[in-house]
């Protein structure tokens, strides 16, 4: 997968849109489902981005040590 941080940003944007669509467009259980999926996706995208940045910094640090 090329440019993983770009894909992370795109995932984050999609999940934020899902969250707000659930807030505005739907009511009751549909709204709650969209909000849960959107919020869970936002958390996943943030953690995935953090994991990618940690992995790349560790890789750069190992290259500098060699």
Image (spheres, rainbow, N blue to C red):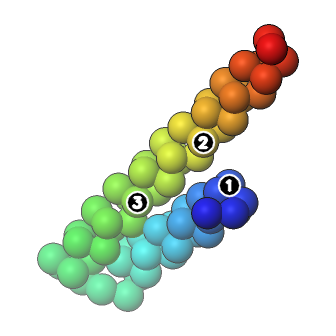
The residue carrying pointer 2 sits among few (fewer than 14), some (14 to 19) or many (20 or more) residues within 10 Å by Cα, namely some
Disc 2 versus disc 3: nearer the observer: 2
Are dots 2 and 1 in contact, CB under 8 Å?
yes
- Which quarter of the figure is the C terminus placed in? top right
Along the line of sight, the residue nearer the viewer: 25 or 33: 33
Q: Is mark 2 on a helix, strand or loop?
A: helix
Say which residue label 2 marks. 52
Residue projecting furthest to the top = 65
Q: Is residue 50 visible?
A: no
Are dots 1 and 3 in contact, CB under 8 Å?
no
Along the line of sight, the residue nearer the viewer: 25 or 44: 44
Q: Earlier in the sequence, mark 2 or mark 3?
A: 3
The residue carrying pointer 1 sits among few (fewer than 14), some (14 to 19) or many (20 or more) residues within 10 Å by Cα, namely some
Q: Can residue 41 be seen in this view?
A: yes
Q: Which of marks 2 and 1 is nearer the N terminus?
A: 1
Q: Position of residue 53 (x, y in %)?
A: 66, 37
In the picture, measured across the screen, residue 41 lies left or right of residue 37, that is right
Residue projecting furthest to the left = 29
Residue 41's label in the rendered image is 3
Residue projecting furthest to the bottom = 25
The residue carrying pointer 3 sits among few (fewer than 14), some (14 to 19) or many (20 or more) residues within 10 Å by Cα, namely many
Q: Where is residue 23 in the image (x, y as percent from the top left)?
A: 38, 74
Question: How far separated are the C-alphas under marks 2 and 1?
Answer: 8 Å
Q: What element carries label 1?
A: helix
Say which residue label 1 marks. 5
Q: Where is residue 45 in the image (x, y as percent from the top left)?
A: 50, 54
Q: Is mark 3 on a helix, strand or loop?
A: helix
Question: How far separated are the C-alphas under marks 1 and 3?
Answer: 15 Å
In the picture, measured across the screen, residue 41 lies left or right of residue 54, that is left
Please name the residue shown 28% across and 62% down the image: 36
């Amino acid at each position: 997968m090329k440019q993983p941080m770009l894909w992370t940003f795109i995932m984050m944007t999609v999940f934020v849109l899902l969250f707000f669509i659930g807030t505005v467009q739907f009511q009751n259980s549909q709204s709650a489902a969209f909000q849960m999926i959107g919020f869970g996706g936002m958390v996943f995208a943030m953690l995935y981005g953090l994991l990618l940045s940690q992995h790349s910094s560790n890789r750069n640090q190992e290259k500098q040590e060699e």
